[in-house]
Amino acid sequence: MAKKKWLSVFVLVTMAASLLAGCGSSGSESKTAEGKEAGNSSKKKVVAWAWDPSFNGAALKIAKELYQKEHPDFDLEVVDMAKADLEQKLNTNLASGVKEGLPDILLVNDPNIQKYVTAYPNTFADFTDKVDFTKFSPYKVEALKIDNKIYGVPFDIGVTGMFYRSDYLEQAGYTAKDLENITWDQYIEIGKKVKEKTGKYMTTINPNDEALTSILLQSAGSWYITPDNKGNFVNNPAMTETLRVYKAIADSGIAKPVTGWSEFVGSFNAGDVATVVSGVWQVSSIMDAKDQSGKWRVAPIPRLNVSKAVNASNEGGSSWFVFNDSANKDLAMDFLAKTIGGSSEFYERFLKENGGVGSYIPAFSSEAYGQKSDFFGGQSIYRDFTKWSTEVPGITLGMYTQEAKDALKNELPNILQGADLTKSLANIQTLFEQQVH
Amino acid sequence: MKRLTTAGVHLFLILASVVSLFPFVWMLIGMTNSSSDILKGRFSIGSKLMDNVHKLMEMTNLGAASWNSAVIAIIGTFGTLLLSSMAGYGFEIYQSKGKSRLFGLLMLSMMMPFAAVMIPLFRMFSDMGLLNTPTAVVMPTITTAFMIFFFLQNTKSFPRELLQAGRVDGLTEWQLFTRIYMPTMKPTYAAAAIITFMNYWNSFLWPLIALQTQEKKTLPLVVSSLASSYNPDYGIIMVAIVITTLPSILIFFLLQKQFVQGMLGSVK
């Protein structure tokens, strides 16, 4: 009997203690929140999530400096996270309906824009009247548009180019002129010659990475899915041509097989390949190999053999969102609109200090964008890249880009082994529809 | 013939140790090289160690992150050891109705993937106002079915005569647990400590969700944020990984003898 009594007393005490502990901590929590607000009356602090402290995080710091000139009481905290981590946190917050811990400003990868805005309506602020979007490359604005509203501020772009080793191509008998305005079939022919004369591969290929197919598709104004989120694999000449070219590159023996990102970067840092078709942000990885200074150049990417295809495309890029429920919504929006959404000075500094290229057209004619790069043999690479960026076809990335890419990846090995392309494309289409609907 | 088999066994063991040690060697060599040398596959000690360390110190607040990790891992380990051993002891020593059913239910919880309970858990901790605290990180896994099971299994070989002798000498039930059970089961505690410490130290997903500000981040979160920039500096990442791995290795070597004993069963 005595034992039972003792036990119930113990249970009661534990419950009371845990209750008190709960109260205590939530009490102190609200206190710190109040304390913060009191501190903020002199300085208004906005919080942003970004994923690369030396790139987009650094861009925010430049923007902060510019904005503070006019608004000395403005302050910004950048929380750096890995991109996958950021998306995981964001999804948990949004799915559970908990606002606590969300920032005011959010960096969004362009292919995720439509998904977020559609899946979580009224969560993100409408920027349509806050920024002059005619000053940005049209394809970049197109990606942010949903039902004629524009949900963010365009940030960095991934306009593509064909980086090449001029020394290898010279050995194979090609000059810069020979690489302008070519098709992918010509590219493969050049690759064979390079392989024969120098023993070097023309490029790398990775069947688990959909970067190349994405670049090819957008260069023809097409995408894995249609704007109304249907699979775009059958009866799509751009898709058929993209996969034909992809297989031709794999079959021709000019591509070094790689399995991952580090092996891909390692192959050009070690001088194993003659060309790299990639977004402008690849400049920094290429320039890591300091011993190769002066040997690199950039040309426009080759073109697909279909109507409307151009020698320009895009790989990657991101934009800034503001949360509708944020306590500092107006301040955060004004901050973005005045800097990343409308300051040439911001884009000039972003390029000079971090090698970042934006889509803000007024900045393209600035001195910073015209600088000659010794690493690239004195070429004004950014002038070229920005020129190509205005030619990139605008596409709607839709809601299910990742699912469509996964469906394609699933079938890619069969295509590379010579399966009938029409049949394979039908398979991909079915697989995608099964996954999404 | 026998000599031949021994040679074969040795050859196999040598190969296995090369395979398992290679990542560590690669990590140690990597932290002395620059990022592009690592990508090129350079396999010799370089001269960039201090550069990498300096850059890492500049980019991250390692002190705070180590402190956060340590607080979580130490509180979590002590809490888990105490609660799980009490539960395992209770399940094995005391008899009561429905005990085996309750234990079955507990085992079922092992089959629940963490991702499935994450969102409700997040809401709960938000409602309790505990998000962004070490408490939020430690609480959900402070008792795991696995640890309770581990203690229960090891308690099976615990000599109950000791408890009877203790009772005759007038010890209370609590004293029996702390003065007789705990000291006897040291090797089991050591093994459990290593497993639990490593789990807390390396835990990633839940801390990522539950910790919200930069200054509360743990070491694995810092390493992860280093690894995903567009042009990651692998030299710096290697230094960070070495720092993150060291405590686990140290604890393992400190408790190695007990660990092996504990896995074999505490009492022989």
Image (tube, rainbow, N blue to C red):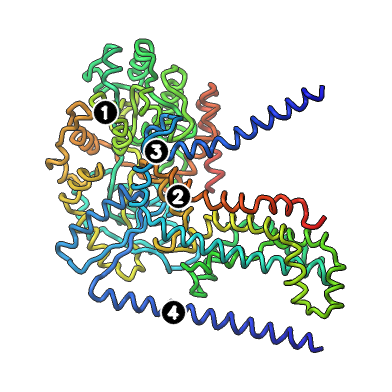
* Kind of residue sitting beneath label 4: Ser
Q: Are marks 3 and 2 on the same chain?
A: no
Residue at 51% across, 35% down: A409
The residue beneath circle 4 is A28
**Is disc 2 in contact with disc 1, using a CB cutoff of under 8 Å?**
no
* Kind of residue sitting beneath label 1: Pro
Q: CA distance from mark 4 to mark 1?
A: 59 Å
Residue at 47% across, 55% down: B219
The residue beneath circle 2 is B224
Left or right: B98, with A85 as reference point: right
Q: CA distance from mark 3 to mark 4?
A: 52 Å
The residue beneath circle 3 is A223
**Local crowd at mark 3 within 10 Å, few (<14), some, or many (≥20)?**
many
Horizontal and vertical percent position of residue A35: 34, 78
Q: Secondary structure at mark 4?
A: helix
Q: Nearer the viewer, residue A393 or A174?
A: A174
In the rendered image, the vertical position of residue B139 relative to residue A389, given as above or below: below
Q: Earlier in the sequence, mark 3 or mark 4?
A: 4
Q: Nearer the viewer, mark 1 or mark 3?
A: 1
The residue beneath circle 1 is A300
Q: CA distance from mark 2 to mark 1?
A: 35 Å
